[in-house]
Amino acid sequence: EKNIWQISKFSKEGNPRIARLIVLAIIHHDMARLYGGTGHKEQELSNYYEALKIGNSINEPTFLSIVNMSLGLAYLNLKKLDSALAFEQKALNYSNSSGYQINKGRILIRIGTIYFRKGNYALAKQYFSETIQESLQQNNLQDLAEAYVSLANLYSASENRDSSLWYAKRGLETFQSIGSPDGLLTAYTALSSIYKLQKNVDSAFLYQTLAITAKDSLNNVEKINQFQSIGLNEQIRLRKLEEEKIQTQNKIRTYSLLTGLGVFLLIGILLYRNNRQKQKANKVLETTLANLRSTQARLIQSEKMASLGELTAGIAHEIQNPLNFVNNFSVVNKELIAEMKEEIDKGNYLEVAAIANDIEDNEEKILYHGGRADAIVKGMLQHSRASTGKKEPTNINALADEYLRLSYQGLRAKDKDFNASFKTSFDESVGRIEVVPQDIGRVLLNLYNNAFYAVNEKNASTSSAGQTYEPIVEVSTNKVGNKVEISVKDNGLGIPAKNVEKIFQPFFTTKPTGQGTGLGLSLSYDIIKAHGGELKVETKEGEGAEFIIQLPGV
């Protein structure tokens, strides 16, 4: 309701662009909640960040409070406590600055929960206590009851059992007053644990029995309906309070009834006008979304063609070797055939047979090196065309080695001064696994190029400082249980801590303008996820980075 009011506000002020941005931000926020509810954590975070980005661009504190609060809960569910704390603190700041206090108690209790999990009981107690004060001011019994039970658990953990028992009972009484089934289960469980620590077996057993009964009731449709009815009564109670407040306000408005009617008429006209503008805004949004999808498809294809361009120089160098062998052995065979004709004329058939054997050996070498050239060309064609998505048994060691050499030779072709060492350690037990080879090849090429770029940048900085440095890129494969790991490690500049969580986001890049689109790692992350694997990074700023690909094995 607050966000809809803001849309109306900006529309009336003649700023439909901001109104449209708020609509788009709300869409991303709601999509994030849907993804989170279905277990798609990456898409959940991505949509929350899009909503946050829009909120920052228009500097709307009410919406920023909501989306930071949602991001805090997402990271809390992922057990990333530092990130969760940072976002919840921002949500609290925006809540205070905007005057939007409805969710303040919920934010405070989450911050307290985070400190509790981090073992900082003093700060946890402070925020739980603030939650109680805020909930009493807002008459929010749900948050009040949760704060009581949270304090009970805190005191239980710090072995202050008397205080723990007191707060747990207060929480139970409050949950009973609003009829919250989840809350009753939480309170019964807390009381059972407290009595168990006090070795009060009878009370512990009683509340454990009540907790089991409450849990069973949550799965009973009839009981759920009853609890919903009780919850509805609480909503009706709150609505009655609101209605009483409105009635008081109506008495004051009675003295200006005629003026009020005129205001309502004006509001009706404005709402009609805003509705028309909203319909136009929806059409613009639909067109914008279609254009975004089209642009995204073009960017992805552009990234693929860019990686093909990076391969071209390396392929030219790699294909030259087998072609040289083919040409050289062809020349030798031509000379041997001429020599064989002479021996035939002389009737020296033993020598003819020996020459024929040499020609046969050379032909096998020509065939082998021709096959090498053919494989390189086919690999290039596979990389250039769109992926069919069809998995096939692939020699991971050979694929990793091939793209490593192509990446290195491609960079050498573009920059003659570029030089780096690379080491390989391939586990032969890895064998063949089911993957889409051209997609995995793109991932490897991107990681290799990034690694060589990192060591080259560090080499330039250390050289200018007169320091000694040996740039090294290490590639290894290992079979770990039923998984296959591919490691790409460099001793370059590493990734700053502030950028680690952003590197897999689309369009995020630390390279200078014109040297990177920021899509490489994002596409690589999506490709590995589509294979049922994981792409992780371990890094220390100034010392290097290691990207680890985990793929399902045989």
Image (cartoon, rainbow, N blue to C red):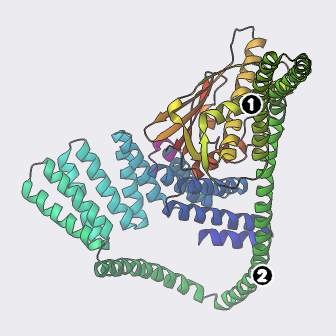
Residue drawn at 16 percent across, 62 percent down? 207
Q: Quadrant of residue 454?
A: top right
Residue drawn at 30 percent across, 71 percent down? 218
Say left or right for 197 vs 1: left
Disc ID at residue 368: 1
Residue toward you, 24 or 460: 460
- 136 relative to 357, above or below: below
Q: Identify the element where label 1 is drawn.
A: helix
Disc ID at residue 276: 2
Amino acid type at circle 2 is Arg
Q: Which residues are magenta?
A: 78-84
| 131 in the magenta segment | no
Measuring from the top left, give residue 531's x and y in whole percent.
58, 50
Say left or right for 39 vs 30: left
Q: Residues within 10 Å of mark 1 (few under 14, many from 20)?
A: some
Residue toward you, 475 or 352: 352
Q: Identify the element where label 2 is drawn.
A: helix
Measuring from the top left, give residue 263's x and y in whole percent.
70, 85
